[in-house]
Image: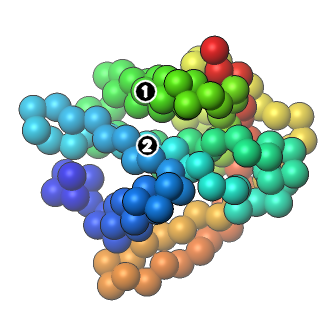
Amino acid sequence: MVRSLGQEPYFADRLTKQDTGHGVLLVAWQRGVAVGDVYIWLGAAEEPELRARLPGVALLTHLEVVPWRRNGGIGTELVWAAEERLLAEGHEQVALGVGLDNPGAQRLYQRLGYAEWPYGEVATTNVVHHPDGRQERQREMCRILVRKLG
């Protein structure tokens, strides 16, 4: 997985969180090569606005597809797989944040039925995982998109 997607510290962190029930890492594979991933955040949201307005709602984070496989439906399949899993576990809705500088991702999510919430943009936390193990927290303004499941 790390060979094609890189980000070894990120995946180590997410797999540790998965082991403690905090979330689920889904990975798309083609011919034995990891070509994309998404993390389902099941813990309380870090952002107070999300905790207050969407208590207990799962969040999709870190959706990515390797550059040479983009625009081939892999991102859509990862989102659908995450939604199916959440629905099977009894979740009624899911949310995510999209950076203001990422209109392509916003179009993808809107095409998949996500709608922007009415409470404005939110300062979210982007954690950069450095190769030496350090984690750097960066502020990122995002639009919050929500989708009812089922």
Q: Is residue 28 above or below residue 3?
A: above
Q: Is residue 130 above or below residue 50?
A: below
Residue 81 pos. (x, y %): 43, 27
Which residue is at 37% across, 82% downward?
133
**CA separation in Å, label 2 and label 1:** 10 Å
Within the image, what quadrant is residue 105 found in? top right
- The figure's colour scheme reads rainbow
Which residue is at 59% across, 17% downward?
111
Q: Is residue 33 above or below residue 13?
A: above
> Which residue bears the numbered disc 1?
81
Q: Is residue 20 left or right of residue 122?
A: left
Q: Which mark is residue 38?
A: 2
Mark 2, Cα crowd under 10 Å, few <14 / some 14-19 / many 20+, is: many
Residue 12 pos. (x, y %): 34, 67
Camera-nearest residue between 76 and 107: 76
Q: Amino acid at mark 2?
A: Val
Q: Is residue 104 visible?
A: no
Q: Amino acid at mark 1?
A: Ala
Residue 9 pos. (x, y %): 34, 71
Which residue is at 65% across, 31% downward?
91
Which residue is at 53% across, 78% downward?
136
Residues tagged 2 and 1 counted as in contact (Cβ below 8 A): yes
Q: Is residue 15 left or right of residue 149?
A: left
Q: Secondary structure at mark 1?
A: helix
Mark 1, Cα crowd under 10 Å, few <14 / some 14-19 / many 20+, is: some
Image quarter where the C terminus lies is top right
Q: Is residue 43 above or below residue 79?
A: below
Q: Is residue 42 left or right of residue 32?
A: right
Residue 23 pos. (x, y %): 50, 51
Q: Is residue 140 visible?
A: yes
